[in-house]
Amino acid sequence: MYRKIMQYLKEWKKSPHRKPLILQGARQVGKTYSVLEFGRTEYENVAYFNFETNPTLNKTFDESISPNYLIPILSHISGQTIVKEKTLIVFDEVQLCERALTSLKYFCEDEPNYHIIVAGSLLGVAVNRARFSFPVGKVDIKTLYPMDMEEFMLACGEKSLVELIKRSFESDTPLPSALHDCAMRLYREYLVVGGMPECVMQFVNTKDYILVRHIQETILASYLNDMSKYNNLNEIKKTRLAYDNITVQLSKKNTRFQYKLIKKGGRASEFENAIEWLCLPGIVSQVYKVEQVKKPLENYRDIDAFKIYVSDLGLLCAKKDLTASDILYMIEELNDFKGGMTENYVHVQLTANGYNTYYWESERGAEIDFVIQREGRIIPIEVKLADNTKAKSLKIYMDTFKPAYAIKLSSKNFGFESGKKTVPLYAAFCI
């Protein structure tokens, strides 16, 4: 299956300023597959090392982290002749070996012509709590996210539809209604399946939602298992409580995260470490409120006001135990949850495109779901489920801040009117 990360990896390989690459991301998003596929197609051979399945590797790095010492031993272990610029060296689950991460500094300084990519599911947690010196400035870092809507449609064999969607997005011209309906159906399927590559592959091959759900439940179980790593017993309990509660809070009309909803009397001081743990490995992410709409938005975020979204829509539906038909037909019982789920979907697409997202709220309660910096401009994004809803908050925002234009995401076809760019939900990946 095509992953957009491939283009980034090709550019990394060609770059004269290339450094060892750290590829981070949540478990099961396709890090290992993407790196090995890249190595297979772009290099003469791949020397692959997994610190989870081969824990004795740690001893090698304990002895020395000098590239001249390591390369002959790694060649012997992998059974591959490691040649500068022709061999891709891959360290997988590298968070289990702190010294391997430290060695990247010396590869960068002393032997920059060795091409190295390291990957890990809990890298953020490991680095944050490590006892060693992280190679700051000596590595390139890239985050891999679950497959976005575009990658999902391509996996479903809808390449021509993707091209038509991109064209309509650029020109603000509606798609033919039959194609629009087809794309909306694919969007609802994506909500059920999500973007975990194994789930997408199973869906494409079988169209069996029950098999997809089984994989999703396995991934959720692995997340729970991961929570016991780098955590003491007290923190494990809090982390699981917080994770279970995030999906509950997405069902609230006001999706702003509230500690007191995790448990009665819950406070930031009690749960902020748990939230940080969930954010570091990419299981969830925080979207902060901006107090002022000015550049850079990061300077004006309110650290006490934020929303939390999960990294994958399919896992969200699995965690809520929603059936495929519930989502495909958007049953009425889901009305409380639909808004939060749709916001979560849009956040996933924006994050995959590299945006830092924020939200805005007026003193009187008008709210803009997302505010981003796009092409040097601050752009508001309003997310609506239906195509006939009036965006009162968006009007207030536009009257107040006079943006170059606004984006309104809904089930409505493409268009542009009164400074608002109308984009169907399935085309959020175009932003």
Image (spheres, grey):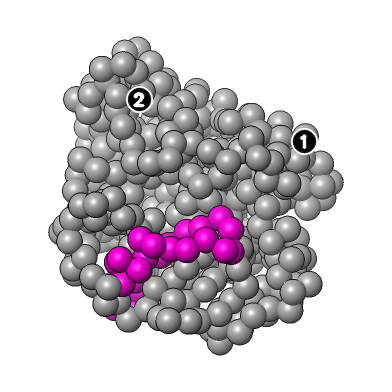
The alpha-carbon separation of the residues under discs 1 and 2 comes to 33 Å
Residue 160 rendering spot, x and y as whole percentages: 73, 77
Q: Which of these two is toward me, 332 or 113?
A: 332
Q: Magenta span has 240?
A: no
Depth check, mark 1 against mark 2: the one in front is 2
Q: Residues within 10 Å of mark 1 (few under 14, many from 20)?
A: few
| 87 left or right, relative to 109 | right
- Residue located at (53% from left, 51% from top): 342
Q: What is the quadrant of residue 46 in the picture? A: bottom right
- What residue would you read off at disc 2? 261
Q: Position of residue 100 (x, y in %)?
A: 35, 42
Q: Nearer the viewer, residue 246 or 206?
A: 246
Start and end of the magenta stretch? 373-398
Q: Quadrant of residue 129?
A: top left
Residue displayed at 24% across by 72% down: 401
Q: Is residue 28 above or below residue 342?
A: above
Give me the residue at 35% from left, 25% from top: 261
397 vs 251, left or right, is left
- Which residue has dot 1 on it? 211
Position of 102 relative to 245 (above/below): below
Q: Is residue 382 magenta?
A: yes
